Amino acid sequence: MSEVKAVRLSKAAGIYNVSSDHIMAALKSKGFSDLNPNTKLTPEMITVLDKEFGSDKSIKQQADNTKLDKGLKETIEVPQVVAPAPKKKEEEKDVLIKS
């Protein structure tokens, strides 16, 4: 059997593509206690997670291996339209009012 490297619970959430709350709930239902995001997972815990979330892990691996063809980016120049200056009403005249 291959040796499993110790992983923290928060890192396992990223590996299995589920939240750390889901992982803690699954482990608590199997009888493990004293769980927090910094808990190092034992090999027994990892086998429980593989059974519980193995399908999610494989879906994540397939998605990570999928290449997206982004194609070539084209630049398009839009001609600038210059708006004519607004027409001024007849030049405003200064009006002086004497009382």
Image (cartoon, rainbow, N blue to C red):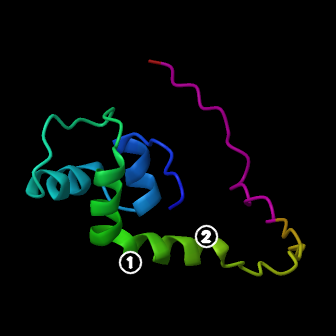
Where residue 38 sits in the image (x, y, percent)? 33, 32
Q: Is the magenta stretch mostly helix, strand or loop?
A: loop
Magenta segment, which residues?
A: 83-98
The reply, left or right, for residue 69 in relation to residue 10 is right
Classify mark 2: residues with Cα within 10 Å, few (<14), some (14-19) or many (20+).
few
Which image quadrant is residue 37 in? top left
The reply, left or right, for residue 33 in relation to residue 21 is left
The reply, left or right, for residue 6 in relation to residue 34 is right
SS assignment at label 1: helix
- Any mark on residue 80, and which? none
Quarter holding the C terminus is top left
- Looking at the image, tell me whether mark 1 or mark 2 is earlier in sequence order: 1
Which image quadrant is residue 66 in? bottom right
Residue closest to the eye, 28 or 90:
28
Which residue shows up at 29% across the image and 53% down it? Answer: 44
The reply, left or right, for residue 21 in relation to residue 80 is left
The furthest residue to the top: 99
- The residue where tag 2 is placed is 64
The furthest residue to the front: 1
Tell whether position 38 is magenta: no
Q: Which amino acid does label 1 sit on?
A: Ser
Contact (Cβ within 8 Å) of mark 1 with mark 2: no
Tell whether position 87 is magenta: yes
Q: What residue type is labelled 2?
A: Asp
Q: In this view, does 78 lie above or below 15?
A: below
SS assignment at label 2: helix
- The residue where tag 1 is placed is 55
From the viewer's perspective, is the residue at label 1 or at label 2 nearer? 1
